[in-house]
Image (spheres, coloured by chain):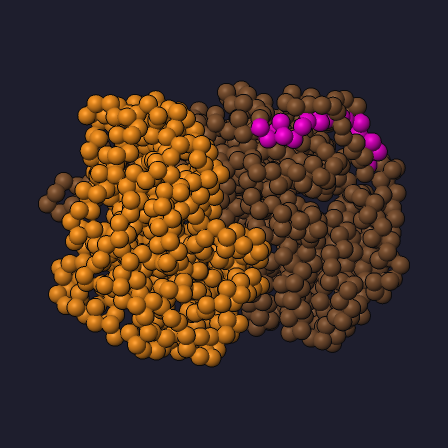
Chain colours: A brown, B orange
Amino acid sequence: MTHPLFEQHRATLEGALQAIATRGYWSPYTEMPSPKAYGETAAEDGKRAYEAHLGQNFELNQPGQNGWGGNEVSPYAGALDVRYPLCDHEVLIEAGLAAMKGWQAVGAAGRTGMCLEILARLNRQSFELGHAVMMTTGQGWMMAFQAGAPHAQDRGLEAVAYAWREQSFVPAEAIWEKPQGKNPALVMKKHFELVGRGVGLVVGCGTFPTWNTYPGVFAALATGNAVIIKPHSNAILPAAITVRTIRAVLAENGIDPNLVTLCVTDNRSTTQALATHPSVKSVDFTGSNVFGQWLIDNCKQAQVYAELAGVNNIVIDSTSAYKAMLGNLAFTLSLYSGQMCTTSQAIFVPAGGIDTDEGHKSYDEVCADLGKAISRFLSKPEVAFAVLGAMQSEATTDRVAHANSGQLGAVVLASQTLSNPDFPVAQVRTPVLLACDAADEPAYMEERFGPISFVVKVADTAAGIALSERVVREHGALTVGLYSTRQEVIDAMTEATWRGKVALSINLTGGVFVNQSSAFSDYHGTGGNPAANASYADSAFVANRFRVVQRRYHV
Amino acid sequence: MTHPLFEQHRATLEGALQAIATRGYWSPYTEMPSPKAYGETAAEDGKRAYEAHLGQNFELNQPGQNGWGGNEVSPYAGALDVRYPLCDHEVLIEAGLAAMKGWQAVGAAGRTGMCLEILARLNRQSFELGHAVMMTTGQGWMMAFQAGAPHAQDRGLEAVAYAWREQSFVPAEAIWEKPQGKNPALVMKKHFELVGRGVGLVVGCGTFPTWNTYPGVFAALATGNAVIIKPHSNAILPAAITVRTIRAVLAENGIDPNLVTLCVTDNRSTTQALATHPSVKSVDFTGSNVFGQWLIDNCKQAQVYAELAGVNNIVIDSTSAYKAMLGNLAFTLSLYSGQMCTTSQAIFVPAGGIDTDEGHKSYDEVCADLGKAISRFLSKPEVAFAVLGAMQSEATTDRVAHANSGQLGAVVLASQTLSNPDFPVAQVRTPVLLACDAADEPAYMEERFGPISFVVKVADTAAGIALSERVVREHGALTVGLYSTRQEVIDAMTEATWRGKVALSINLTGGVFVNQSSAFSDYHGTGGNPAANASYADSAFVANRFRVVQRRYHV
């Protein structure tokens, strides 16, 4: 059984299947916001489309609506003044369940084809989505466009490809013929139906409202489930645009659009009621450890896929490219003011210093040189504003002030407050870099989300590797890095990351950064340490979202 | 990277991969205990091998041993008087973790090759295992041989095939090359390491100590984990034989045999400590709802794959083969005295009776005729003893006595106590068949493990289908059946099973029975209703048992 949209997008699907198997670079969605890729008027059209939402009711025609709500405050521009439908979550669940029958009936090919069509439509909305992500999260424009649109679409497509691969293994039917010696064989016909498990709840975060949401949305959808997106209360618009497009594609193709709905609520108890509802069978969550652990502990009826906090770290042993290393780190620590789940927080440097192509550098020199590299990188305001973006939340701004006070460690480089003339309300902060001793565990060994990093003095490289492993095991990490010119050190760190189950970037000195992961090639999170119990994406991310129901009879 | 044992068993693996994809009949392990398949002396050798264990210490050379224990009482023969090593479970965990490094290093091909070799060795021990299963569980010989040896090996091989398929998707390395317009491309080399998650605990049951244990053992093992088997206290020997063989194959191939150990304990608190240990990352369990739910509620550090109790049921609407239907049901209800997780417990029959090829039959006639069919089927003692086996536990015997008393419903056919001259101590019971009304929910709507079934009077077929669906949703089921000559009824029941997520057998009148599932073709359990949260086997059964840890660097 196939479907016209499956055939139409077959090349994209096959590209994705090839990419997840070979893991080279690949993407069907151009990451440059160029007129050549997106059309001459795309940039202007997208900006206007974004602006057209402001001050309006965002109509979705969802069932169970009992009002309008939403109160997003843009880090760049104050109140967005967009109002979203408020709907009874029980009604959304019932409507989603009712829509699943038709979604099941189109089969895996139909679902996959429609998901691919949705992604193609979202790709055409990339400028609109980029602006929505920028204005709700405080990301700089280029990052908001790339991470918010094409890269998020990549992650969605990746999930669709995994879902298709797993579903396509199950044949629709089979003849089972068992020989019986001299007697006639036993012959049965069997049918195998792919059935979604129920409603998939996807809880978004405030910093990456599409990139961290699309994997769960498309994994759940492609495998036959209804989806309810509960966006972060300050990043609703990107989710609302996404839901509207999904609903449009579904309706155009004869599927009840209530399969996918937006649940806007400020009320944590509503989210909790949703997450623990018997009909909700999966919960995808990105956010704090506290609520993530609550979900894991309480959602016994659902599979929870959670990306939580961690303490990403880097061990510096030695380098043959000191300047390039510092430049690479400066970019990583500055990007989006470190408001990424992949930003490095702790940098372990031996007390005796490190060997470099510029001679031996003491621990203090490494601290100072890294501080200078950050200052130099951000010295041009246009670069600083583009890279740093704005503080997404007051809590992060407060954490920066706390770190600046020197209470967490010696201030190597203080965070500066910048004023962005294009966005006067934006809170812009440069990174704060602190120095501390390995023994100062309370300082660096919990996630301090935002542009706050520690150069931690360790006894030697071996101690740094051991500490990195312990941090990963106990507190989790999505990324670790290593700088070393010695193979035995690289091998030791590699083995430590196998035990701790964390992705390792080695000697990054060029245009790839430890905080970036590339869809189809890099696994984002291993699912094997406390920072995340799942990975974007692998078979485990999709395989348990559907079930096979068989029937058999004699023929 | 390959491995000599992988190459040696490649044809078996490829057969299994083909079988799970096409789901026709296939097995590499002959189910008939024939000299042609197993060798002229195999039957005698296997019996002697079994007998040689009796009255002995079963040496396994495991670490942390602090005594001998085990106190199995055979349903056929009284005390087995075999003593097994009692080992500190913390020591077993540490030893398992230490052994994982070498197991990881041989890669998926090495692990798969060794698992295939283990299964081949176990197959050669099929007679020994068959006797061990028969004497510990009370199964009849033929069933003990088939389900205990070749069919269990099939299920193990099936898990190995799924594990290989998922692991083989992950390339060992990749070159990632991202174009940068006119600038040189960014090029990175990436490595992807498959890493087991930790210790896999497999908790066995008393009735199917190998068939229900091998899927979890081989899924965990093949994906790189250490395994601790905690057998049911009355069915240790089949697990001990299995563990000894696994350890021998591992040691012969340079792997620390402590990767797989047997943990014998009567102490539930030890099992609980094991199951909640931070290093235990998966728990495979077959058994009671009470302990299964405890595991699901408490093992937050592990993925729990649980097969629990259910209320399997059958809807009878009409049939074109009344006698054959009754004969098929009589066999199902009698096999191993209904001590199977797949035995039908509730048979829903319309109050107005059913249309058959022998004319209309009233509800009372269906009850009576089914009772007669069971009596007739078991009228020859040699058939009865072979099919019924013996009561595995006193609790089951007590449940039969309770049902016989008429307190649960009108007794259509009382259970009889038979005396097996070959095994005078064996408690042999024929099935008890009760009649009750749909409203008598407390009677038939909880699992009454053993040869206890209810013919439940429902208003009509539609009511029967609705009741079946509700029972499946609320109480779970591994199997449901339907007898109907009308396509619209078959369609309605099919849709009910999609919603309830349970496997359906339609109009079974020949040599296939609703309580049987065939490896590589039938999914045992869907994982979508309360009777089981996982299936033997599918991708979801293996995909979350390993993680991918990557590293990357510029080239």
Q: Give the residue displayed 75% in from the left and 70% down from the top.
A: A438
Question: Which image quadrant is residue A492 in?
Answer: bottom right
Q: Which residues are magenta?
A: A76-94
Query: For this view, does B335 lie left or right of residue A202?
Result: left
| Looking at the image, residue A458 lies above or below residue A104 | below
B518 and B502: which is toward the camera: B502
Q: Give the residue displayed 22% in from the left and 38% down from the top.
A: B372
| Looking at the image, residue A69 lies above or below residue A437 | above
Q: Tell me where residue A256 appears, x and y as whole percent.
A: 54, 23
Question: Which image quadrant is residue B506 in?
Answer: top left
Task: Indicate the quadrant containing the N terminus of chain A: top left, top right, bottom left or bottom right.
Answer: top left
Query: For this view, does A529 lie left or right of residue B397?
Result: right
B369 and A373: which is toward the camera: B369
Q: Tell me where residue B348 appears, x and y as whole percent.
A: 36, 32
Q: Give the residue displayed 84% in from the left and 58% down from the top.
A: A403
A81 magenta-colored = yes
Q: Give the residue displayed 27% in from the left and 31% down from the top.
A: B366
| Looking at the image, residue B157 lies above or below residue A551 | below
Task: Report the number of discs.
Answer: 0
**Does residue A236 appear anywhere in the picture?**
yes
Query: For this view, does A310 lie left or right of residue A415?
Result: left
